[in-house]
Image (cartoon, rainbow, N blue to C red):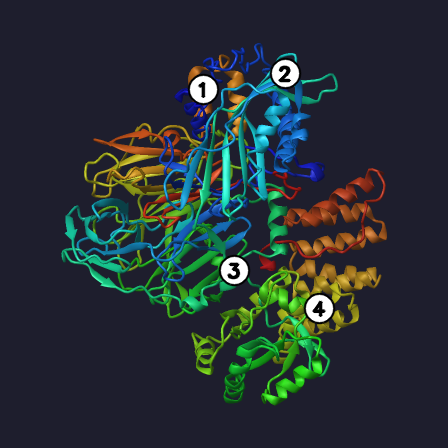
Amino acid sequence: MDFERPEDKQGQADFRGSLSGYEHDVCFVRAPTAGKPFVEAGYVLGLDFDHDGRAVAPLDIDGDGDQDLAVLSLQGLQLLQNDSPPGARFARVRLQATRSEPLALGAVVRLTADKRSQTDRVRLAEGFQTQTSTTLHFGLGDARAVDGVDVTWPSGAAEHFGGVALDRLNTLVEGRGEAVAALIPQWDEAVRPKGRSTASVLVTALDREGVTRPLGRLGRPTVVNFFAPWCEPCKRELPALAAFAARRPDVDVVGVSVETKDLTGVLAFADAHALRYPVAFANDRVIESFFGPGGKVPLPATFVFDEKGQLRRAFLHTVDGSEIERAVDTRRTPPSVVDYRQIIVDLLQSGRNDEAALLLEEALQRTPDDSFTLVRLAELQLHMQQVDRAQVLLKRALAKQPDNVRALAVYGETLGVKKDLDGAERYLLRAIRVAPDDPTALNNLGMVYARRGDWTAARDAFARAVEAGPTFARARQNLLDAERMLRGEGPPAQPDKLPSAPPGPEEH
Amino acid sequence: MRQPVLLAVVTCCLACSEPVAPPPAAPAAPPAPVVAFEVRVPDPFERNAEASEHVALEDLFHGTNRALCKALAGGDADAIAALLTPDFAGRAVAPEPDAELGEARIRTARFPADAAVLDGPAFARRLTALTSDMPRVDRCKLKPFEFKLAAAHDWAWSKVSFVVDGQGVAGQRLTRRGAWFVEYVADAEGAWRLRKADIPGLDQVEARGAGFTDISRAVGVGLFRDDTTHRAVTELTDQGGLETIGGLAVLDWNRDGRDDLLAWNRMRVMALFVNDGQGGFERRTDVLDPADVGLFAVTVDLDGDGNEELITTEVVGCRNGKAAMPIFTRRGERLARAGDLSFSLPCGNHRAMLYQHITPHDIDGDGDLDLLVSGYGSETSRGDFNKFDSTEGTANLLFVNQGGLVFTEEAAARGLDGTRMTYVTTFVDLDEDGHDDALVVNDFGPNEVFRGDGAGHFSRTAFPPLTDIGQSMGVTVSDFDDDGKLDVYVSNMQSSAGNRIVPLFEGELKPETYRTLLRMAAGNTLYLRRGSGRFEEAAGPTGVAGANWAWGQAYVDLDNDGDRDLYVLNGQTSNSTEKDADL
């Protein structure tokens, strides 16, 4: 294990330092080498992530016959696309047992292609905290045919199967001796992801009236079409888009001009093409959001978002109305309240506060009394120093739910910001009466006492906050600061910033 | 001039991470003038591990070696030479690699050893050849993998693992790596420089038309990838509060033949990503309340009705010594509680780390799936406990399927009475008697084998080498040497610190303890089946041992060339301090 140097945090309570941190994942690849069957190739394959990796499962997201990877680390979930060139052969094998449990877990499968055999075993949950597909994948390189498959079933029976096809999903039913081959559904080449994108309908741009507003809104599917007056292919697709927009009032369409100098020319162009949907002008944020940092815009480009604001399709070619329509109508499930909350939490966690505020305001229009929305929006307002507005929202939440702990705690925080320490204490104590172990309320109460200079009471409150939320770093720091004050070692560096909520269940 | 095979073997052993002796004096190299050249190991050497480690890590790894790497990455021969003593002598590899092997997507080549003994400036110039064809160097590392400090603290010997990664002139990704044997000396100010170096060959790996791209955002998949959560996770790891996070599952939720993905973590997030077949995934967060899901969950049909159940390691309640894990069943687009897995548990146990894994398997051959739940920590496992041979974990559980989503817990009655700290269990016929045995993979102690009789009864058995000592996290059973027989790959902790420190105590420790400690630092294990129920541990010679602190693994064709490769995740916990720059 490599004990890295915990330079800047050495003094902090309980700080442990990296324990074999930032190690790079490894890939042992079969390659011609002198001596060993495997050679480490993590870097050259682009798989040498330095996260704290835990679970990995192969899958084929696009049906192209190579193995993509889903990876879960302490730092998040990643989907990794296998960029191998197409054309390599493979076979998939799924077993169906008739004389044991049907998945045939543990069955041994030997597939022979061009006289070369590979042996694998049906598994469901190996590796580390991973459930894999029970369909087996055999990469076959440039093999010309599958000679056959030999199965040792859990029942103990050995059986040979013919009729196993290349590049197909082959179902092998115990006792039948002949495989049933099926095509594997694929994603169209055109929609396969080409790289990272953070495209969002909530990114803001100047509209034709000169007002900065988001390109779209959540709750409705949105089509974002990039164009420019000098783009010939754009001219060809615009009639289809205009017709689509007229035909589908349930879908928002917005045109984004990448020509941003000759604004009059762009608007004249839009009118000449009878674009009745909103037109906006691209800016750096829009370009970065859709095409990456320093991204070049390949025109034409059209993006389809679902009601949840998730990008569903990116067309980097001239589109027609039916293509757009299909993309919009594929698998639509209206966003639930849970979805909205998740999106909001995601936005907040990504620091995209503006977008979160927009969405919260919109949600408030629909459900004016939803306490989740009220409190989250109030927190954002407080964060943006809009203390009065935050208090209005919180009062509404408390009118509905007088015992909403988070509302009480945040309201106490607003009073503290306004230097009404007695009021703050009152609300925080109310929050604590409802939830004696709420770390945020306890910590905020400690802050009130600290501002009064009552460091003994402050220390006790912080200590309770730490006890209630052992992972609440801010409370821990406050506790240390209070103890330092009590020892007469002078004030902490930044004593009075009211902390945000701890990481923990309620944040997610 | 090629070096004899012996040197190649020494270099090979870097990857297999087995301790090797320092290289013997190389045979004289005609026709160059004969120079006595030996990289010497100090004797007596410092046996205080702390003092020795300080020099190895602070002075060399973070100091001299890093400076050398930085100079190398910048192609600065003068800066390299400044890190060598005036009387430096070294042997480097040839400036060009041998011809690349094969036309495969992953190509390898080798920089052979060069017997010529070079002075400092010449050695420095030769080193820069290693990066002169890399327009971009992404990483360079010279890590002491074995280390001996002279008792007087004025010189040191180290076997250093060297790696440089970068982009080649054709835009391809290149790795060059191998062992260096180095003598360092400290001057009066305590600055360490290289006095001798011997590089007995380097390996080169290159990818052509293979690789992976992170497309999470582009297709709408992701959990916890934002900065705020990252900070929260780091805060937790800083305090040692986070080691495992949750898991993931590949399934076909909507039965359209496309892979969907379910992921969850213990921060109470669970999301189902449904492959829309149109270039994206639809994220659903309302399939199941994430508060109901523990570290692990598995989705499989347990009652034969064609609908999947989800079972999870979360203990949902404990009263009067009776606890339960919930069973959920598919109801339309949701999972709904449909029963419990009930079992005995001393209530009051710390819940989060109790159970790590669930293995569905038909243990009694009655046609339905039973469930082995791997028990891990207990309330005592965060404090002082036996880290090498712990039997203080939570007992494993075996739920025998009685039909209709009713299960009875019968682990002890059926002989699966492991109480080690188990991460995962798998069932495979190890002794080749036609019945599946249980291989129980444990942290803080040896793995266990329970021989199965095919009727659901098991008996504990010593099964070397599979039951040798280890600190194991994960397991994959497959055929790793293409002989048609199932082998076993286990991820463990590989520790370069261990490889540096343990040899300091050779002779002071009991030989058995010494071997055990080295074994624990050596890395992942591959047990190759040799017939008649015999296995041979061969991770080193196979090239799959060195994966650092390893966890999950996937054995699949990564480069799409028709054979299987092995991806191993690693890293225990990364703290929030600025990470060590690799340059």
- Mark in the foreground, 4 or 1: 1
Q: Chain of mark 3?
A: A
Q: Chain of mark 2?
A: B
Q: Quadrant of the C terminus of chain A?
A: bottom right
- Give the structural element (helix, strand or loop) at label 2: strand
Q: Amino acid at mark 1?
A: Thr
Same-chain check, marks 4 and 3: yes
Which residue is pictured at 72% across the width and 37% down the height? A11
* x then y, percent, for residue A151: 19, 49
For residue B155, the mark is: 2
> Disc 1 designates what residue?
B513
- Mark in the foreground, 4 or 3: 3
Residue A162 seen: yes
> Disc 3 designates what residue?
A195
Q: CA distance from mark 1 to mark 2?
A: 29 Å
* Quarter-of-image position of residue B434: top left
Q: Chain of mark 4?
A: A
- Give the structural element (helix, strand or loop) at label 3: loop
Q: Earlier in the sequence, mark 1 or mark 2?
A: 2
- Mark in the foreground, 4 or 2: 2
Q: CA distance from mark 3 to mark 1?
A: 51 Å
Mark 4 touching mark 1, by CB under 8 A?
Answer: no
Residue B472 seen: no
- Mark in the foreground, 1 or 2: 2
Q: Amino acid at mark 4?
A: Ala
Residue B92 higher or lower than A175, as above or below: above
- Mark in the foreground, 3 or 1: 3
